[in-house]
Amino acid sequence: MITRKVYLKNNEEIVNILGPSDSNLRTLERAFRITVFIKHDEQNESAVLTLRGKNSSVDKAHREITNMLQSYYFIKNEKKSQEADETPEKPLPQGAIYMSCSGKEIFPRTENQKKYIKAAAESDVVFATGPAGTGKTYLAVAMALAALKRKEVKRIVLARPIVEAGERLGFLPGDIEEKVNPYLRPLHDALFSLLGPETFRIYREEQIIETAPLAYMRGRTLENSFIILDEAQNATAEQMKMFLTRMGMFSKAIVTGDITQSDLPGGMPSGLVLAEKIFRNIEQIKFIRLEKTDIVRHPVVSRIIEAYEKWEKKK
């Protein structure tokens, strides 16, 4: 003879395991030829079941109660999920791209940004260039999340060239993921603000969203994907070719960058600059230029860019 205990944490578990007038436990006792004792803790709204009988019978009864608990929570969570799916979402206002986790509606704010959104809707490959703060990356990420939500794609892949400016990767602490994380941080920031950190973490764990250095794209074929290449001014012509040829069926690619801020060494030509010359006659590929007037960051950013432009012209 042995005894085993089962702990019921709340009244919900007690009601569902015991059944009406403890009928479930009486059934277990008869089925497994055991005795079940119940000790209630009314203050904590919990209970302890003590199972007593032959070794194999008690083990079987214990497994049965554990399965009952798991089945109950599975059905409960499944029902919640179905109810959430059946709940109609608030429709987006006209012109909005996406609604963030905080309920913020994402709109294009300028005429060029509207052209950017329109080009992405009509074409599978879009190049968006312009100075910092014009929403190139943020809007691309919002469009990718919207496409994922509409089930137009199954995953989002975001890539950046890793160009060392100052510190070399080998001297940064940590493994390769920790070394490249600072370079991918701007993409993570956009995803955090739109999805929230918890949903972003889940999407990454389930590989629905992937952020990676551009070099890691070689040899892959990305189907049913929304692919974004950020800071593309730092991609060489060879890297740009490699990235664009990763596209598989039912995929879309957006390439963003600022041609005035290339960090490529030794005057190496930027693949982003060359792309417009190479693809200018391909109708399915669209090029959008965002200007200083499209900057949606702090107002002083546009003044900073103007000051740099004047200084560079004098040089």
Image: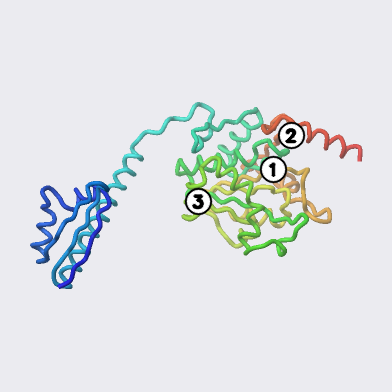
Q: Tag 1 or tag 3, which sits nearer the N-term?
A: 3
Residue at the disc numbered 3: 201
| Residue 50, placed above or below residue 110 | below
Task: Count neighbours of disc 2 (C-alpha within 10 A) and say few if under 14, some if 14 to 19, many if 20 or more.
Answer: some
Kind of residue at badge 1: Asn
Q: Secondary structure at mark 1?
A: loop
Quarter where residue 61 is shown: bottom left
- Per the rendering, the mark at residue 281 is 1
Q: Amino acid at mark 3?
A: Arg
Q: Residue furthest front?
A: 43
Residue 44 versus residue 184: which sits nearer the camera? 44
Q: CA distance from mark 2 to mark 3?
A: 31 Å
Q: Position of residue 46 (x, y in %)?
A: 24, 51
Pair 3/1: label in front: 3
Q: Amino acid at mark 2?
A: Val
Residue at 60% from the left image edge and 62% from the top image edge: 219
Residue 183 horizontal side relative to residue 4, left or right: right
**Residue sitting nearer the eye, 236 or 294:** 294
Q: Which residue is mark 2?
A: 301
Crowdedness of circle 3 by 10 Å Cα count: few (<14), some, many (20+)?
A: some
Task: Determine the CA span between mark 2 and mark 1.
Answer: 34 Å
